[in-house]
């Protein structure tokens, strides 16, 4: 169980059904709802939307504590708990941190740093990478790395794969594969289009594979010694980390995934004063990242990051305009033609899974003339993920998404390196370990095949 609805709390308002992109919510108006697990893609948008809750004030301490215990939520949590909820794995994280025989590595997705401060009273979209790193160090992780680094690796692998498909006659259009809920939707409904997915794993899974191989070597350890935790804005990432094929390091590449909300609970539970934390850098070398890795958190960001590097792979020249604004926006489906040397690169961006079905049907019918398509399940990409801080008012939600998006682009602009292939740590890992993008070892560790 990754996402579920508590039958004892659900009032049957069906607001969750309105936002479910997979049409997986089942039930009559006014009656408790259930989730069709065959259709559910575990995106957690129902968790974000749900307004039926239990609290000490409304139901009493005994009932409230019972719900906390059922969901493995820390005793220190006192906020309302809602009918639609996602699995909480903080007990596994606490156990690992307490085990001196485990070398704990944590990675944080780019969308986490523009949202987690909201859980501590900060303005919507406040950017806090330094405090985030400091909190994770204070919790006792042995290494605090950044999912932006494997996002840069993803661009190297996915960008090279796209160039090969375009220039050598591969399956087109190529779809991004970094959103696990989108991949699950395609597997459930359009398995015949699986070859259109990029074979590159998501940044989370690339990070996990790297941490238990190259990362272990850096520490003089073996993969079995590493316990890998990811902090994600996405409720589906725990499902992705548990997929049977995600063990190319020789072990489960990511041992456990928790959400932004979960991490906030853990920080509070451990008595850490967020406001008093002084900024701290992510650990090196696997914490060094670029603006391209950062913008993975917003819709169109994966596309823009890929174009920044892909342009140079094709032309041998730096891209004239680093900010590829043609692929930015929040429309459900938008297309652009990007001039890449002599190539007119035709791209599309799908924002929100409900908008993907016409696109898939067009691909199936052979009527969509595009090279590359980014798909994100959540309304505005990862910044609006199911595991992000919960906002009850629709107006607050819109404001939060806009603020988080703006903070993400601001962070991109302030970084020294803004293209994945210019990251010195990326150059180093290919020189010392991966050899080159799409090499034999890179394919073994960093690529996969879906719809197994």
Image: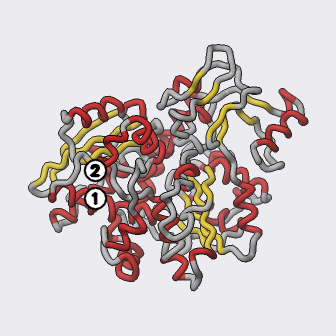
Q: CA distance from mark 1 to mark 2?
A: 8 Å
Residue 349, x across and y down, in percent:
32, 41
Identify the element where label 1 is drawn.
helix
> Dot 1, crowdedness within 10 Å: few (<14), some or many (≥20)?
many
Q: Residue at x 37, y 75 (%)?
A: 434
| Depicted 132 relative to depicted 383: above or below | below
Residue tagged by mark 2? 324
Please, which residue is most extreme toward the bottom here?
220
Classify residue 337 by image quadrant: top left
Please, which residue is most extreme toward the front here?
452
Q: Nearer the viewer, residue 388 or 69?
A: 69
Q: Residue at x 29, y 60 (%)?
A: 159
Asked whether the beta carbons under mark 1 and mark 2 sit within 8 Å of each other, the answer is yes
Residue tagged by mark 1? 308
| Depicted 316 relative to depicted 36: above or below | below
Q: Seen in the image, is 330 located left or right of residue 103?
A: left
Residue 279, x across and y down, in percent:
61, 66
């Amino acid at each position: 169980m990754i996402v579920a609805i508590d039958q004892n709390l659900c009032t049957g308002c069906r607001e969750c059904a309105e936002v479910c992109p997979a049409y997986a919510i089942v039930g009559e108006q006014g009656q408790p709802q259930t989730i069709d697990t065959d259709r559910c893609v575990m995106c957690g948008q129902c968790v974000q939307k749900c307004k039926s809750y239990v609290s000490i004030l409304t139901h009493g301490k005994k009932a409230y504590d019972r719900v906390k215990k059922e969901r493995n939520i820390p005793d220190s949590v006192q906020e309302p708990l809602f009918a639609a909820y996602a699995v909480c794995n903080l007990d596994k994280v606490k156990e690992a941190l307490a085990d001196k025989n485990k070398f704990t590595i944590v990675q944080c997705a780019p969308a986490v740093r523009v949202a987690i401060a909201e859980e501590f009273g900060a303005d919507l979209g406040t950017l806090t990478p330094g405090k985030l790193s400091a909190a994770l160090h204070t919790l006792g992780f042995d290494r605090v790395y950044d999912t932006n680094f494997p996002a840069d690796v993803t661009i190297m692998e996915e960008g090279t794969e796209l160039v090969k498909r375009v220039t050598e006659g591969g399956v087109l259009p190529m779809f991004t594969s970094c959103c696990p809920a989108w991949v699950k939707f395609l597997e459930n409904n359009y398995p015949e289009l699986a070859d259109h997915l990029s074979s590159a794993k998501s940044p989370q899974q690339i990070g996990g594979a790297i941490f238990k191989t190259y990362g272990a070597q850096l520490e003089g350890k073996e993969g079995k010694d590493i316990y890998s935790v990811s902090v994600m804005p996405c409720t589906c990432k725990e499902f992705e980390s548990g997929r049977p094929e995600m063990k190319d390091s020789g072990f489960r590449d990511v041992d456990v995934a928790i959400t932004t909300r979960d991490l906030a609970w853990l920080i509070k539970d451990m008595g850490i004063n967020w406001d008093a934390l002084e900024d701290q850098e992510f650990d090196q070398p696997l914490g060094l990242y670029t603006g391209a890795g950062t913008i993975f958190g917003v819709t169109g960001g994966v596309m823009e990051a890929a174009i920044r590097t892909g342009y140079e792979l094709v032309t041998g020249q730096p891209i004239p305009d680093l900010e590829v604004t043609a692929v930015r926006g929040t429309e459900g489906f938008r297309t652009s033609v990007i001039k890449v040397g002599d190539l007119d690169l035709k791209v599309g961006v799908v924002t929100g899974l409900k908008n993907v079905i016409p696109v898939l049907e067009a691909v199936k019918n052979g009527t969509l003339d595009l090279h590359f398509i980014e798909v994100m399940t959540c309304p505005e990409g990862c910044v609006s993920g199911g595991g992000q801080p919960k906002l009850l008012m629709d107006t607050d939600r819109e404001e939060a998404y806009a603020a988080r998006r703006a903070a993400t682009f601001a962070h991109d602009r302030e970084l020294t390196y803004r293209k994945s292939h210019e990251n010195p740590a990326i150059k180093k890992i290919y020189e010392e370990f991966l050899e080159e993008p799409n090499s034999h070892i890179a394919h073994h560790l960093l690529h996969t095949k879906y719809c197994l």
